[in-house]
Amino acid sequence: MPSVAIVKARELEPETFIPYVRHVDETTIALDSRALMVMIALDGVSFETADPLDLNGLHRDLNTLYRNLADERLALWTHIIRRRDNDYPDGAFANPFSATLNAKYRARMVEEDLFRNDLYLTLLWYPTRDPAEKMTKLLSRLRRARRAGRELDEEALKQLHDKVTDVTAGLKRFQPRVLSLYEHDGLLFSEPSEVLHQIIGGRRERVPLTEGRVSSAIYSDRVIIGRETVEIRHEAETRYAGVFSFKEYPARTRPGMLAGILTTPFELILTQSFAFASKADARIILGRKQNQMVSAGDKANSQVEELDGALDDLESNRFVLGEHHLTLSVFATSVKDLTNNLAKARSHLTNGGAVVAREDLGLEAAWWAQLPGNFRYRARSGAITSRNFAALSPFHSYPVGRKDDNEWGPAVAMLKTASGSPFYFNFHHGDLGNTFVCGPSGSGKTVILNFMLSQLEKHDPHMVFFDKDRGADLFVRAAGGTYLPLKNGTPTGCAPMKGLELTPGNKVFLAQWIAKLVGTRSRELSVSDLRDIAGAVDGLADLPVQRRTIGALRTFLNNTDPEGIAARLRRWERGGPLGWVFDNETDDIGIGAKFLGYDMTDFLDNEEIRTPLMAYLFHRVEQLIDGRRI
């Protein structure tokens, strides 16, 4: 039996497989091959509810972007990392009902198997991809760099950054964010290194910026590669993984053909790479394939004709060609679970029309080929067009929202989507706090709104709920709020001229509001009428608050005209048929409550009262918008 020393001597160090040297700036990592690398995180686009025309447009835009990026010195790596994520948003609740509801909901959600899809695009720039042709130019630049006391190829760095700028502009709809160094508790950490660490070991953790090689910093979990299975040992757990690769590419590609993997109930990493080929090399590849089929007497005439069309499209710059590879790594906590997960994953790949193979003899190469820049380990690669690549890697995803750093802080609530992913809900999009909920009767709109408002209580806002059919009555009262069911014929508690201070702004509102009370569709108010109303409102300022009634307002108007404003206000005066609406003893509409609910059901079909009543209530609510959270 070999000794431990002999086994250790035989074991290759991580630097053998991991080509990353160091950060050359906040976003760029240098490789052993002198290539430079930048990683970009993408939010992706929600595809399930998107119009097919929109998805096809995105596919065309991606192809156009790749055509403009095309350079044989550039290679792209894309990753979809599906990982567990049931991190519950923080927050403290002062109300006992909301606190109890949140505790029970949290206990349920943290036990769920929730997964999120993280999308990454990596750009690799090689100063030379053809040593025979460009070695002289490369050595010349390196000599100039050494003479200047620099190891870095500044020209290559500039060219890469130019490409990154083009990519972030072209992928604006996908919310691109360049990964970089960041500070945490006074230390520098590397986002790109954390993603690379996750690709190697399937687990995300903070990776600090060190003085040594990046490859050493990101290899902290022991990776043991067997015949068909990868074992990943961490001090807290052991995990297993298997790898699929494309054995034969599908005859046709379409956006979303691999979307099934975005819903799997287990962790995985889908890796793809695309190294741009020059047009001359692309001609050779397509021409050779066509000649082989003709020479072999292949009867697939349609494929020969398609190659003719492909050559025409290539010359017309409708696409570019590149060398592509794809692997899918599937994870589990036991070999038995891994077998089940692999069976499910295989079906999602084959549903797209590809022939896939589970890696065995090529497992080690396939595993390390997941790392951006590891060209020599790509065992199963093939030439495809930029159209194909845009379809195989369309950056589709499910929305996840934002857990932290929102307008009011932590997310309002964590929801579970149909894909088994968490969605961190916020009423705000940026600094805009508008949310629209729609659905048929009985679908649960009121329930979801009540729940969201209960979760919102942790942000200590003022809340006003305009309700129908008393759907939120019990919830508002349970949450410690005031609920006012307004009824036809019953005093509403509204007394606008008593409740509003007669500031210039409120005087303008009262004048406009009174005009609504007395105006009709058949008779518009004249300029003199509006002037009389404004004068009457000014006259109220000389009266004590308790005497500011509609009757008092009429004394400042012309009472001799039987069709005048004063006469039309009589029905709104206390004792009149509508006196119960706005001429009450006090203005008692609960506007000072932290949580206030109004049931407006009775007034929805009462047009005469509905409009001025809603105008007054909305005006009072608008006055609460003074910097407080509402």
Image (cartoon, helix red, strand yellow):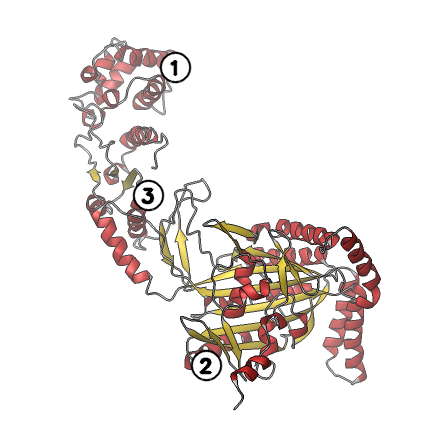
- Mark 1, Cα crowd under 10 Å, few <14 / some 14-19 / many 20+, is few
Sequence-first tag of 1 and 2: 2
Where is 251 relative to 437, above or below?
below
Residue at mark 2 to residue at mark 3: CA–CA distance:
45 Å
- Residue 617 position, x and y percent, is 29, 31
Q: Is residue 255 visible?
A: no
Residue 472: x %, y % from top left: 24, 46
Tell me how far mark 3 sits from mark 1, CA to CA.
48 Å
Q: Residue at x 33, y 28 (%)?
A: 623
Tell me, for residue 475, which label it has, or none: none
Residue at the bottom extreme of this rendering: 1
Tag 1: amino acid: Ser
Residue marked by disc 3: 459
Query: Quick one: quadrant of the C terminus?
Result: top left
Task: Please identify, in this view, whether the residue under mark 3 or under mark 1 is nearer the observer.
Answer: 3
The residue at which mark 2 appears reads as 339
Q: Which residue is mark 1?
A: 526
Where residue 389 sits in the image (x, y, percent)?
64, 65
Residue at disc 2, secondary structure:
helix
Q: Is residue 523 left or right of residue 393?
A: left
Residue 370 at least partly seen: yes
The quarter of the displayed image where residue 156 is located: bottom right
Give yes or no for contact between labels 3 and 1 (Cβ–Cβ under 8 Å).
no
Q: Amino acid at mark 3?
A: His
**Which is more N-terminal, label 1 or label 3?**
3
Q: Answer left or right for 282 relative to 509.
A: right
Q: Are discs 1 and 2 less than 8 Å apart at CB?
A: no
Distance from the alpha carbon under mark 1 to that under mark 2: 83 Å
Label 2 vs 3, first from the N-terminus? 2
Q: Which secondary structure, mark 3?
A: helix
Q: Nearer the viewer, residue 15 or 125?
A: 15
